[in-house]
Image: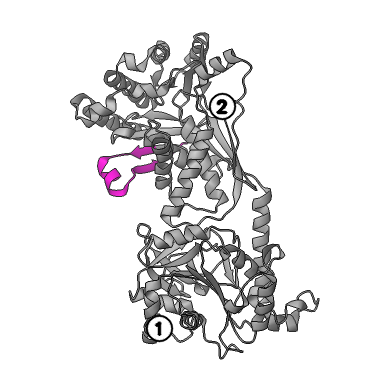
Amino acid sequence: MICILLVAGHGTVLETEIKQNDETGLYSHLIGVPKSLLPGIGGMKILDFWWKTVNMRQLFTEVYIVTNADKYKYFERWATANDFPVENIINDGSTTLSDSLGAVADLELVIRSRKLQDDIMVIAGDMLCEDQNFDVAQVIRFFRSKPGELIIYYEMEKGEKSTSRGIVEVCPDSHRIIRFLEKAKDGLTSSRLASVVFYCIQKETLPVLSDILSQMEVTDGSFGRFWEEVINKNLLDVFGMKLPTGFQLIGQVTLSDYTKWLNCFSAKQQDKSSKPITCRSYARVGLIGNPSDGFNGKTIAMTINNFWADVTLVKSQTLVLLPHPLNDPTEFGSLQDLFSISRKEGYLGGLRLLQATCKKFYQFCCKQGIALTKQNFTLKYDTNIPRQVGLAGSSAIVSATLKSLMKFYNLTDNDLPKPVRANFILNVETDELFITAGLQDRVVQVYEGLVYMDFSKNLMEEQGYGNYISLDMSSLPQFWLAYLNDPSDSGRIHNNVRQRWLSGEPLVVEAMKTFAEFTDQARVALMDKNWNHLAQLMDQNFELRRSVYSDECLGPGNLKMVALAKQFGSAVKLPGSGGAVVGLCLDPAKLVEMRQAFQEAGCVFCVITPYNPSASTGNSQL
């Protein structure tokens, strides 16, 4: 591949303003300096960043710079100081803005004069970028996976106006650009995706480039008008890739614009370098419908404030995953100590969850056309969610890790919508770590709060995810939670039910339909604040589960907790896969007595504090 850096612009506004308005003399040294050689972030010249980004012989056979006759000497001097081949600087002969060729004609000049016959990457060398340390190899791989040209775009911030940008509309599935609007008028599009002068063009397109240009009604020679014509008239197939960072073209801009963008981008870089990112995800309890979430059923679940997982990410020189001192032990007091810890905690802590999430995140971004910046980080986690009691501790760590990565790389809900995010978390656990799991935990940890979930087969097949609705959390009754001090592996409770369901066993198939019916009835009970009916449904949920899974599968510990709760007249069911029970006791006096009874039986008992995202102080970050 060949890279072409375009730096032939004749920006006069900035220079004129410095001459007329800079009474301090702070910017007088910039008079006459080409835009791409102006200071960028950290004092480096803007062009220095781009040269650093593309100066990789394993990716580019040649790199060319196209400039004008007026500024040629500046780039010749820059080339000798930066180990750039002077013979690769191409002079387009223009000396003023009025006789400039335009960006598209400059590109054609390089192709013709150097007889290029390879794929081409085109970049405007006078673009100020918030973070130019992105992975160009990732861009090239994505380009070569698509049967057409490639345009890089970014998502504009609130203050940016679409009337000053080339706006693209992108198909989220194919990543094909279906419409291009150069300096779009207000109301023409709702898209906030702005194209930048950063393109990849196939070698097969080069011979016909001149023909396309001659047939077009382009008057200003800009790439914006070029792509608008090419895309909207379907002359070429063009695809889009997102860079999750800010861009500004230092074209005909004022001194205040230039200094504002420079200060803004510099502040963001400093903020990202110095401030750690901490994101939290919460444990959840399934209130009704589980375990039908894995069987095209319906559930209602709730995140709780009692237990959580935190993941902290801070920028670093190398990528480091820090083991948790308790959950990922590598030092033991003795062989007996190792035996006791391994017997109770198992062999696998949370470190594998961090690693699998990072791996899946990079893979997802490559597939979805999101070019990540090349910056490293240190990742660590902490959690107080009890292990192996079915409170979704593993998925909480994965969820919090994903939140941290999205925030670090400036990804938004548009890049990873909530339904897709829940699928992503499930895939980390099932595909990468072979953990038996369903969607319920991941959905409620992404949406947070009290969530109704419909996993009907038609929904899952048509859109790839279910129907997820956040429910009102005001005036909820008092739920409680109890769990075993020494639980067995909660995963065993699933037994062979899935195979029985897949084979169409009537008992299992009908049970999953009934769980879904319980969920719909519970949703009405929650809306009507009919707590007695909700309690009855919770009891019925457990009894149906017991009839399908058998007492042997449920295990004596779970059955013991259920029986104890029923002695006090409380509704009770399993909140997850086993090891804990969740209940609804409508008699406050009996709740106190029941707590004591559970504690005397060797269980941990706690009153649930629901986590309501609408009333939170921002702990979850995203």
The residue range painted magenta reads 452-473
Question: Element type at marker 2?
Answer: loop
- Classify residue 69 by image quadrant: bottom right
Q: In the displayed structure, does residue 577 sit left or right of residue 380?
A: left
Residue for badge 1? 210
Q: CA distance from mark 1 to mark 2?
A: 63 Å
Question: Element type at marker 1?
Answer: helix
Report the front residue among 441 and 84: 84
Q: In the displayed structure, does residue 468 sit left or right of residue 70?
A: left
Residue for badge 2? 327
Q: How far across and how far down the image is residue 517, in percent?
A: 27, 32
Q: Is residue 378 above or below residue 261?
A: above
Q: Is residue 286 above or below residue 156?
A: above
Indicate whether residue 73 is drawn in magenta: no
Say which amino acid is labelled 2.
Answer: Asn
Q: In the displayed structure, does residue 8 sit left or right of residue 169?
A: right
Kindly report which numbered mark, 1 or 2, lies closer to the viewer in this rendering: 1
- Classify residue 84 by image quadrant: bottom right
Q: Residue at x 52, y 23 (%)?
A: 607
Residue 621, labelled with which disc?
none
- Classify residue 390 by image quadrant: top left
Q: How far across and how far down the image is residue 90, in percent?
A: 57, 81
Which residue is farthest top?
600
Q: Residue at x 50, y 34 (%)?
A: 352
Q: Residue at x 37, y 14 (%)?
A: 555
N-term mark: 1 or 2: 1
User: Are dots 1 and 2 in contact, CB under 8 Å?
Assistant: no
Q: Residue at x 65, y 68 (%)?
A: 48
Q: In the displayed structure, does residue 459 sit left or right of residue 483?
A: left
Model colouring: one colour
Indicate whether residue 457 is drawn in magenta: yes
- Please tell me how crowded label 2 is: few (under 14), some (14-19), or many (20+) other residues with Cα within 10 Å: some
